[in-house]
Image (tube, coloured by chain):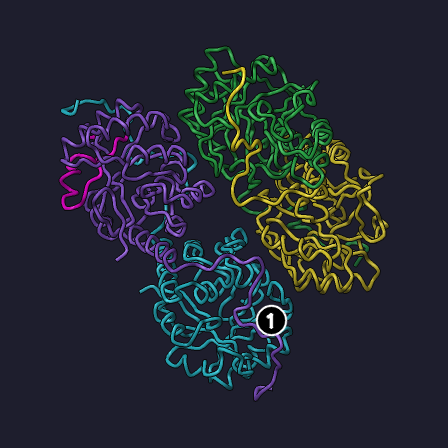
Chain colours: A purple, B cyan, C yellow, D green
Amino acid sequence: MDTWKVGDVELRSRLILGSGKFRDFGVMREAIQAAGAEVVTVAIRRVEARMPGHVGLLEALEGVRLLPNTAGARTAEEALRIARLGRALTGERWVKLEVIPDPTYLLPDPVETLKAAEALLAEGFLVLPYIGPDLVLARRLAQLGTATVMPLAAPIGSGWGVKTRALLELFARERASLPPVVVDAGLGLPSHAAEVLELGLDAVLVNTAIAEAKDPVAMAEAFRLGVEAGRRAYLAGPMPPREGASPSSPTEGVPLGGPGR
Amino acid sequence: MDTWKVGDVELRSRLILGSGKFRDFGVMREAIQAAGAEVVTVAIRRVEARMPGHVGLLEALEGVRLLPNTAGARTAEEALRIARLGRALTGERWVKLEVIPDPTYLLPDPVETLKAAEALLAEGFLVLPYIGPDLVLARRLAQLGTATVMPLAAPIGSGWGVKTRALLELFARERASLPPVVVDAGLGLPSHAAEVLELGLDAVLVNTAIAEAKDPVAMAEAFRLGVEAGRRAYLAGPMPPREGASPSSPTEGVPLGGPGR
Amino acid sequence: MDTWKVGDVELRSRLILGSGKFRDFGVMREAIQAAGAEVVTVAIRRVEARMPGHVGLLEALEGVRLLPNTAGARTAEEALRIARLGRALTGERWVKLEVIPDPTYLLPDPVETLKAAEALLAEGFLVLPYIGPDLVLARRLAQLGTATVMPLAAPIGSGWGVKTRALLELFARERASLPPVVVDAGLGLPSHAAEVLELGLDAVLVNTAIAEAKDPVAMAEAFRLGVEAGRRAYLAGPMPPREGASPSSPTEGVPLGGPGR
Amino acid sequence: MDTWKVGDVELRSRLILGSGKFRDFGVMREAIQAAGAEVVTVAIRRVEARMPGHVGLLEALEGVRLLPNTAGARTAEEALRIARLGRALTGERWVKLEVIPDPTYLLPDPVETLKAAEALLAEGFLVLPYIGPDLVLARRLAQLGTATVMPLAAPIGSGWGVKTRALLELFARERASLPPVVVDAGLGLPSHAAEVLELGLDAVLVNTAIAEAKDPVAMAEAFRLGVEAGRRAYLAGPMPPREGASPSSPTEGVPLGGPGR
């Protein structure tokens, strides 16, 4: 069976879901099921602040592996506080590390992220850091011992697709020196998710594209299929793109003839 | 149930397969099954000429709906002869019309294709013409009464993906004035197939990308999943791509605090 | 000197301008000069109908070589009428052949264009046909003897850029079998024009992107520079894109040392 | 006159050249002149190590403003040493800061770059740092007081073009909070340079694409033209791309008529 690992945990699903922006918990739970997701990330700060859509969220997610995230943290220090809070609330030592000083495009801070990762690892967390498509930073995080690296495809919630493809291809080529690569942010359609998996990267994280579809449950299933399609294609060994065209049915030198004439 | 129609025939699968280039008939049959394909196209000229890989092909495809194609035809006249031969050999009045004077890039001839379509329709064929991404030609064929139009994504066998996307988007916008749109040629990966379906087009035809994968059966299944992913996403009503970023977990104005600190 | 030819006429400028949509004739004339354009196309039907912006247009273009076009023609027959009218009004046997049945995307009709080209050539016209990115059609026109082929980059007036690049690359590879290739329609910025010339294609035609810029004269000069940049780059023999990175300043094996330490 | 500034120095040319990889100094000097470049970057470590092509380089560049670079540095500390060496050798306090631990793709290290920038600024250098397309890092460098930020378009020497466009667009939107943005690395053709300038970014740095062209001097001029084209287009106020097509010569409602019929 084709699996991948976050820390010691073996996972079959390569689609991690976010829990924000859903209409209600019922839809969210159905979407998680339709996605076949084994891991769902939760914004701890919003849970703690009892923001709309977050009261009762942890309870609603019972039975799913939680991935507390540090959304809302603008500095390493804030991220540490939120991560600790997440562990206290959920009992889970996994943390999706987001350090985002930029309120407009929600881009991560490479320096504070690295600092926070180091501190969190020292405190025994299993760290999944959200980063730019920066292979050098990814390797530094790998050397510290993060469980994954999570480069962005495009700004969070944009739905633009794999806009950083040329740089993500470098992640794919250098997979041997990296922990699992989970592409996070910017994926808007199943074809985008399939494209990531076809590159040989390990998994994707999707939230907005599912939660804000007209039919989130159907879209969750569509992403599940897209992820499986991309992964199986990668394993099946695709043909390389050709320089010219190649006839499916070459007929050069074939004489016309037969009963039809 | 979500279906589409070619002529009067209702189809569930939106993935049509080609039968060329497979290692052997066993692999081909398994791939057809893994793809969930209901329709498979066959190069009649090669069958008739008993080309390698084509002796016994029709027998090997028993139980699948055949779509005879006119590969090898460089003129309308040649296409007519091959089409009639195909009907004689298979008993099938469907014909995938290919008129390809160009041996390098295998691009279709718009004028001869139109002429052949008209003649074939007059002879009672159900015509599925392979064309460039030319909306005006597609409408002319639609007015003649072809069962589909089959614009190319990229040159046959190239695996380049949806390189004609800007023009295929026009097909999608104008679907109301067209028969089912089946994108044929150039698709190399499931993400390409998903992208076509996400645009709202009706189906894809794939051959080389499956037959020449290291594991054609696994790749056939990957394409099946990609096509389903794209179709379901289209039906699920995707979010529109955003101008800026949008937090999955907005936290503006959320005070930090709580037990974790 | 690097020149190209339309019929027997040798041209230095590879930028053909359209005369529509300008604020006034003064701006148009300045733009033509800033563009260094030697040829300007004119919508004969609008001139004849005395449409706004077209009364006095021919007079305003004195000193420039006119390229009457058949804009407004939906059929070959209409194109013939407009072309003859253009010859009568301008004394010019050149004609930019546009047969456009589609009022929304302004896409050309391949069949009627071919038919009109044949008739116009028989009447002694020098024909520059506007077509889709269809290499087979282009070759048919070449065989008839048209002076150029003018495939589209994107829909007229869209400004989308070189959206048909994969198909235009085939034109570039097959230049030996074609008359000069002038990319017409859809170019929005000088980088788009440069890209066309870098491919080795012969020229571009631009109208909307210049006429509707805030400063049309400055934009005309920008396009002139872009076209020259692209052409010179093509002639200069570009490096091929690399698989990996390549240091501008390789230092492998270079020991650090010296006064600075 | 349209100028931009690096520190207090006003520059007219928006094309900075690299001095590596040229066949000989004569070609290099001619290319610099053809490019109209006012600033040329030099790999100090190679000069100091008397690497091939670097003996006599500084002398060969007399009359041009030198931009010493720290190519070869893998850490902040190494960069500091090379920068000081560069100041000693050239008398120039400008430094193009490159900290590149990755020998394959030549990607910059965000953390060491930031650290080195801080130290160099404290020592009175004018710092132009090479970075990934990371807006958050760029803002941190801006806050420290670097003279520019220099995000990459693609890996150094790849010639792939503007592969980080979606992220560079964010730099363009946020220009008010940044020093001049000079896109460095990966540009292979003048159209790529024009595209950068059309986005409203300030300048480009090019080396390999010019030095390794068959005719480097002609290519240098082509890039000069491309840069000017892009800049002028930006200033001219381009039309926005359209949703649909827009006729250059609208003729709706125009009756056909006149002498030609």
Q: In the figure, C197 relative to B36: above or below?
A: above
Crowd around label 1: few <14 · some 14–19 · many ≥20 (10 Å): many
User: Could you tell whether A208 is left or right of B89 in the image?
Assistant: left
Residue occupying the point 78% across, 55% down: C147
- Residue C193 appears in the rendering: yes
Q: Is residue A104 above or below residue D160?
A: above
Foreground residue among C58 and B65: B65
Residue that carries the numbered disc 1 in the rendered image: B99
Is residue C20 in sight in this rendering?
no
Q: Is residue B146 left or right of residue A90?
A: right
Residue located 28% across and 29% down the image: A117
- Per the rendered image, the range of residues in magenta is A51-72
Q: Would residue B246 appear left or right of C25 to someone viewing this image?
A: left
Q: Nearer the viewer, residue C52 or A221?
A: A221
Q: Residue at x 50, y 54 (%)?
A: B162
Q: Secondary structure at mark 1?
A: loop
Res A61 → quadrant: top left
**D135 or A135: which is nearer to us?**
A135
- In which quadrant will I find the N terminus of chain C? top right
Q: Is residue D8 above or below residue D248?
A: above
Counting from the top left corner in percent of width and height, residue B221 is at: 35, 63
Residue B67: image location, x then y, percent: 47, 75
Q: Residue A102's spot in the image, x, y percent? A: 37, 26
Q: Quadrant of residue C76?
A: bottom right
Measured as percent of width and height from the top left, residue B186 is found at 51, 60
Closer to us: C244 or B88:
C244
- Badge 1: chain ID: B
Residue A134 among those drawn in magenta: no
Q: Amino acid at mark 1?
A: Val
Count of marks overlaid on the render: 1
